[in-house]
């Protein structure tokens, strides 16, 4: 078993299935109790099952840019209150109303524009989008595109976020300034293209980072380091 797989197994043994990406209408609770507490679905990989659920996940991937999920979730709840979690309904909100509705997500004027641009794309979509197509949308970068592909459209791909960089730089697998594509390649070269593993690995990294990488010194207590200590 290579080291990337070894780390995945260790994280899964520590925290179990994460049930990420949360969906507002789903009643499941967060298995590890950090961050949002509702909408999780550990062990259920059939979700999303509807176009509206797919759309909600894509909106969440945009709303959570540069902020924690808690703020993005509040913005989604606000949209739900307006019955605007469908592409048809969201397009009927004017720019100002949409921006004010998603204010908890921060950068709300920019994100309102991003949501509108994505919604136009989504309304024309007939099959699963490619990564290239998603990256062509204004406001959708690599992490957001990969999150949409993995969690909304069920395409095995690896999502790289700040937590991934922090953990794997600390473990010596990457340089701190490694490019997104280089980090992504590290994982995809060492893992088979498996939807469940890709979803769980990303979610497990997030959970682990919340526990061990919040402060400057806490990362030295990371139990993953013990996997590679030589006698």
Image (spheres, grey):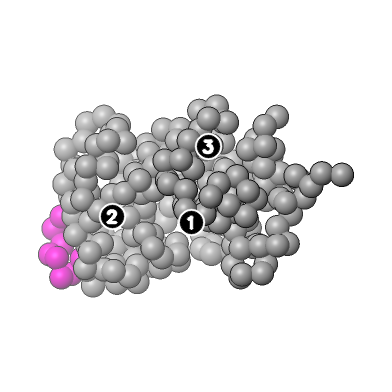
Residue highlighted by disc 2? 85
Please state, as top left, top right, bottom left or bottom right, where the N terminus lies in the image: top right
Q: Quadrant of the C terminus?
A: top right
Q: Residues within 10 Å of mark 2 (few under 14, many from 20)?
A: some
Position of residue 120 in the picture relative to residue 177 (left or right): left
Q: Residue at x 16, y 46 (%)?
A: 120
Left or right of residue 223, residue 95 in this image: left
Measured as percent of width and height from the top left, residue 107 is found at 28, 69
Indicate which label's residue lies in the foreground, 1 or 3: 3
The mark nearer the N terminus, 1 or 2, is 2
Q: Which residue is mark 3?
A: 186
Q: Residue at x 53, y 30 (%)?
A: 189
Q: Does residue 123 lie above or below 130 as drawn?
A: below
Considering the whole magenta stretch, tell me its main secondary structure.
Answer: helix
Where residue 161 sits in the image (x, y, percent)? 47, 52
- The residue shown at (45%, 35%) is 157
Q: SS class of the residue under badge 3?
A: helix
- For label 1, the residue is 162
């Amino acid at each position: 078993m290579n080291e990337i797989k070894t780390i995945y197994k260790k994280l899964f043994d520590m925290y179990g299935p994460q049930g990420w990406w949360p969906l507002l209408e789903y009643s499941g609770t967060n298995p590890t109790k950090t961050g949002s507490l509702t909408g999780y679905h550990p062990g259920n990989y059939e979700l999303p099952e509807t176009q509206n659920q797919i759309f909600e996940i894509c909106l969440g991937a945009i709303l959570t840019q540069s902020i924690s999920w808690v703020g993005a979730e509040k913005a989604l709840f606000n949209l739900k209150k307006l019955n605007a979690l469908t592409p048809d309904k969201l397009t009927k909100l004017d720019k100002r109303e949409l921006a004010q509705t998603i204010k908890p997500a921060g950068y709300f004027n920019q994100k309102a524009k991003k949501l509108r641009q994505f919604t136009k794309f989504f309304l024309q979509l007939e099959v699963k989008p490619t990564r290239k197509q998603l990256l062509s949308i204004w406001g959708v970068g690599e992490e957001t595109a990969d999150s949409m592909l993995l969690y909304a459209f069920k395409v095995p791909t690896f999502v790289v976020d700040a937590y991934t960089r922090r953990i794997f730089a600390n473990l010596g697998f990457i340089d701190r300034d490694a490019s997104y594509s280089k980090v992504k390649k590290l994982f995809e070269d060492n893992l088979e293209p498996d939807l469940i593993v890709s979803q769980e690995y990303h979610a497990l990294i997030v959970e682990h980072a919340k526990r061990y990488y919040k402060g400057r010194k806490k990362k030295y207590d990371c139990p993953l380091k013990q996997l590679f200590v030589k006698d």
